[in-house]
Amino acid sequence: MIYKTSKEIQKSDQRIIQQRVENSIINNQIYQKSLKRKTSKRKVRHQANKKNFQKEMSEVEDTLNRIKTHKTVLGYLIVNSEGGVVRGAFKDEEESKNIANSIPLLTKKARSVVRDLDPTNDLVFLRIQTKLNEIMVAPDDEFSLIVIQTKGEKRDEND
């Protein structure tokens, strides 16, 4: 057996501690580099998501303008799941409040009826014709688009 003196043990311990410190420094440097790479990737992804979002919002704006400027459309509302108006284009604010309060309830009931008939099915679009107007609802989980238009003469489907 080889016996070490206390000085040899101390030197050996110091070398081990020094190696561990060096290893932790190296590991820390590697970790920092990986964080920088992840951060730069996140920035690139964020910029791409921002561009996609802007493009999608531009498309939504174009679609809403096209709907709003159609000759038979009286107005539209975008309503959130609680019935609050997110956006709208109605001349009469009182009318838009009435629509925002009543149409989402009717949509929920229609969705319930569709699911009662077939539990695997869901309401995708609701169209209601009255004597004077037509109410169209495109429901979704978070928002619903409600469009009111006058019941005009027989329209071309491409309008």
Image: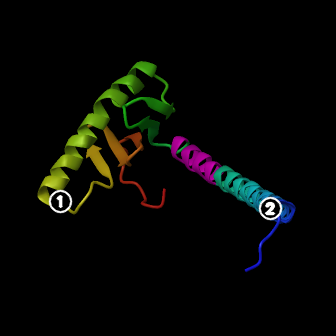
- In the rendering, at what x and y percent does residue 64 appear? 55, 45
Q: As drawn, which residue projects farthest toward the bottom?
A: 1
Q: Mark 2 or 1 closer to N-term?
A: 2
- Which residue is located at x 53 percent, y 41 percent? 68
Secondary structure mostly taken by the magenta-highlighted segment of the chain: helix
What residue does disc 1 label?
119
- In the rendering, at what x and y percent does residue 42 appear? 72, 56
- In the rendering, at what x and y percent does residue 76 appear? 46, 37
- Which residue is located at x 26 percent, y 57 percent? 122
Disc 1 is placed on an element classified as loop
Q: Mark 2 is on which residue type?
A: Asp
Q: Nearer the viewer, residue 57 or 82?
A: 82
- Range covered by the magenta-colored residues: 56-68
Residue 32 in sight in this render:
yes
Residue 130 in sight in this render:
no
Disc 2 is placed on an element classified as helix
Q: State which mark lies toward you, 2 or 1.
A: 2
The answer for how far apart the CA atoms under marks 2 and 1 are is 71 Å
Lateral position of residue 21 relative to residue 101, left or right: right
Magenta segment: does it hold 34? no
Lateral position of residue 33 relative to residue 60, left or right: right
64 versus 43 height, above or below: above
Quadrant in which residue 155 is drawn: bottom left
Quadrant in which residue 123 is drawn: bottom left
Q: Mark 1 is on which residue type?
A: Pro
Q: As drawn, which residue projects farthest toward the top?
A: 94
- In the rendering, at what x and y percent does residue 101 appear? 32, 27
Crowd band around label 2 with a 10 angstrom C-alpha radius: few (<14), some (14–19), many (20+): few
What residue does disc 2 label?
13
Magenta segment: does it hold 62? yes
- Which residue is located at x 82 percent, y 60 percent? 6
Q: Nearer the viewer, residue 70 or 36?
A: 36
